[in-house]
């Protein structure tokens, strides 16, 4: 019977493996290499000492960051960043789910949330310093105070937008509250939640640096500010380079997680496009 | 032979939607009964409140007045004795779950051993001919196959009644014929009762043992028609029978009358 056979859509790529690898290496690395060469050329001809050539910076990078500074400054920064992001994700999703599912709570909190979200988080640093002292907790709180908003607000929107037929389906099969949360509400909101997490990551990185620049004795932000005040220009640039690398690493790690979590979402889009 | 006791009893069901702009009487007065093991089709002009009726049967909507009784006890909410197959399979199946995961989800809260649950899932997928697609995601399948997944999910739940809301309205004609035969086959092999709502007259006559023709809104049951076609039905020979043509013409006329508002409401309807 024809009805019992059916095609299962799969996605295929037609390009050969060799050209794909070549393209995936050349395209992303081509322009940065070109810029580095240009920079080197300009820097060797220039007499401005604020723009050292790439080799000097690479040397400073090796001397500054590979060694004890990695343990004393980079790791604590990354740990605070990681904790701040993790807390933002957990709190943002938990609070967002509760608010998104509870109509009266949403209506009650919406104006307040809009107001709180509009406050630039760096202005909270002096307040946080007064309340919490110059501690790791203070820095993590500052990170959370900025990074939580995109996650919280996107979760609220995503949870609220759960499809009515999907909800009715769960209802008609008497799916329990927890199962509904885990198998319906959160997955349905996950594309928006992930979009929020992506924004939160860049906000968190900015706040990590700023919270260390204000009053601190360790961390990436502190080091960069220290080098700058002491005219250690190549070292300062190497710190900025490291920050950029941390940002790239976060984006790549996020991309991997996102592709895993939202495989169904990208799959649907790919099938619809085909 | 399946047991011929009354399974579903609907009495003076009325549903009025109230909104800021006024009230809409979707269902006027619907009464009918259905025996265990029956396959009843409900057909009516568009906008006659078929979906509303179905939601009331399934316990998803509270009627304004009247009773819906399942096995003698009133329906006040969704019950494990009923499973619904929705028209919009794309919005009823969860795209983040595999076919298997979708069929399994309603079984999670049932107190079953892992093995028993697995058996129900595998068995349901085999019954709809999708055992090979268990690990796929719904969106990788054609519309007809997705609706089969929804049917598998419903039968794995082991309800007494399968409630189907225009389930094949969105699939092409050939797939539709196959799915109709699947419903008849499942009905025959699983002693399951089926309430099948459709706007397609031919479909209602081909599928049903009985056809309820609904009037326009506010709705009542305009006719309760027994379909005296042979139980063994076939897309080609059954549809070519003179009796099939008579029945479909009859139902068609009834619906035309309903649309023109010529049918007279029973006295009990307000």
Image (cartoon, helix red, strand yellow):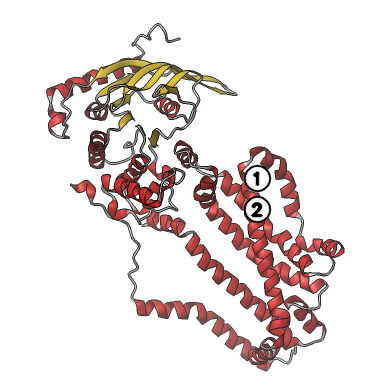
Residue A18 located left or right of residue B67: left
| Disc 1 element | helix
Residue A270 % position (x, y): 40, 58
Q: Check chain identity for marks 1 and 2: say if they share one.
A: yes
Residue B215 visible here: no
Residue at left offset 26%, top offset 52%: A6
* Real-space CA distance between mark 1 and mark 2, rounded to the nearest whole angstrom: 9 Å
Residue at left offset 42%, top offset 44%: B107
Residue at left offset 66%, top offset 81%: A241
Task: Tell me which numbered mark, 1 or 2, is placed earlier along the sequence.
Answer: 1
Residue lying furthest top: B267
Subunit of label 1:
A
Residue B81 visible here: yes
Image quarter for residue B35? top left
Name the residue carrying label 2. Answer: A152
Disc 1 to disc 2: CB gap under 8 Å: yes
Residue at left offset 67%, top offset 37%: A104
Name the residue carrying label 1. Answer: A99
**The C terminus of chain B lies in quadrant:** top left
Residue A90 % position (x, y): 64, 58
Which residue occupies the foreground of this view, A30 or B123?
B123
- The local crowd at label 1, few if under 14, some if 14 to 19, many if 20 or more residues have their Cα within 10 Å, is many
Position of B237 relative to B74 (above/below): below
Subunit of label 2:
A
- The local crowd at label 2, few if under 14, some if 14 to 19, many if 20 or more residues have their Cα within 10 Å, is many
Image quarter for residue B39? top left
**The N terminus of chain B lies in quadrant:** top left
Residue lying furthest right: A130
Residue A189 % position (x, y): 54, 51
Which residue occupies the foreground of this view, A200 or A15?
A200
Residue B60 % position (x, y): 47, 31
């Amino acid at each position: 019977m024809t009805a019992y056979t059916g095609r299962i859509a799969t996605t295929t790529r037609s390009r050969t493996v060799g050209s794909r690898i070549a393209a995936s290496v050349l395209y992303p690395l081509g322009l940065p290499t070109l810029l580095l060469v240009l920079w080197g050329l300009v820097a060797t001809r220039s007499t401005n000492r604020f723009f050292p050539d790439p080799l000097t910076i690479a040397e400073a990078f090796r001397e500054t960051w590979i060694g004890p500074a990695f343990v004393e400054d980079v790791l604590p920064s990354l740990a605070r960043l990681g904790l701040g992001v993790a807390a933002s994700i957990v709190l943002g999703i938990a609070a967002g789910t509760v608010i998104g599912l509870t109509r009266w709570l949403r209506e009650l909190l919406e104006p307040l949330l809009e107001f709180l979200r509009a406050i630039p988080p760096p202005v909270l640093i002096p307040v946080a310093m007064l309340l919490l002292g110059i501690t790791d907790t203070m820095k993590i709180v500052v990170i959370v105070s900025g990074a939580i908003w995109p996650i919280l607000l996107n979760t609220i929107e995503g949870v609220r937008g759960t499809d009515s037929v999907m909800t009715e389906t769960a209802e008609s099969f008497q799916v329990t509250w927890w199962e509904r949360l885990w198998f319906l509400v959160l997955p349905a909101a996950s594309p928006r939640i992930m979009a929020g997490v992506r924004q939160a990551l860049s906000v968190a990185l900015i706040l990590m640096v700023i919270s260390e620049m204000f009053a601190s004795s360790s961390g990436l932000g502190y080091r960069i500010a220290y080098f700058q005040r002491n005219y250690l220009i190549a070292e300062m640039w190497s710190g900025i380079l490291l920050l950029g690398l941390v940002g790239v690493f976060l984006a790549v790690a996020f991309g991997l997680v996102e592709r895993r979590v939202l495989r169904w979402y990208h799959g649907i889009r790919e099938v619809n496009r085909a | 032979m399946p047991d011929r006791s009354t399974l579903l009893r609907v009495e003076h069901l009325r549903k009025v939607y109230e909104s800021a702009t006024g009230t809409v009487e979707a269902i006027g007065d619907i009464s009918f009964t259905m025996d265990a093991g029956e396959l009843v089709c409900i057909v009516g002009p568009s906008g006659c409140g078929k979906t509303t009726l179905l939601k009331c049967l399934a316990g998803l909507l509270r009627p304004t007045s009247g009773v819906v009784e399942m096995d003698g006890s009133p329906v006040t909410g969704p019950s494990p004795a009923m499973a619904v197959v929705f028209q919009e399979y794309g919005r009823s199946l969860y795209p983040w779950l595999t076919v298997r995961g979708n069929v399994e989800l309603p079984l999670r809260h049932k107190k079953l051993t892992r093995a028993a649950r697995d058996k129900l899932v595998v068995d349901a997928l085999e019954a709809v001919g999708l055992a090979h697609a268990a690990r796929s995601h719904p969106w990788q399948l054609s519309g007809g196959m997705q609706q089969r997944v929804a049917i598998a999910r419903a039968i794995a739940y082991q309800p007494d009644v399968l409630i189907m809301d225009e389930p094949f309205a969105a699939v092409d004609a050939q797939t539709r014929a196959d799915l109709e035969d699947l419903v008849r086959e499942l009905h025959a092999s699983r002693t399951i009762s089926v309430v099948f709502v459709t706007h397609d007259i031919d479909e209602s006559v081909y599928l049903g043992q009985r056809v309820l023709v609904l009037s326009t809104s506010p709705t009542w049951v305009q006719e309760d028609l027994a379909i005296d076609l042979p139980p063994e039905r076939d897309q080609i020979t059954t549809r070519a029978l003179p009796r099939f043509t008579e029945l479909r013409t009859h139902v068609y006329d009834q619906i035309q009358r309903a649309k023109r508002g010529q049918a007279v409401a029973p006295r009990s309807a307000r």
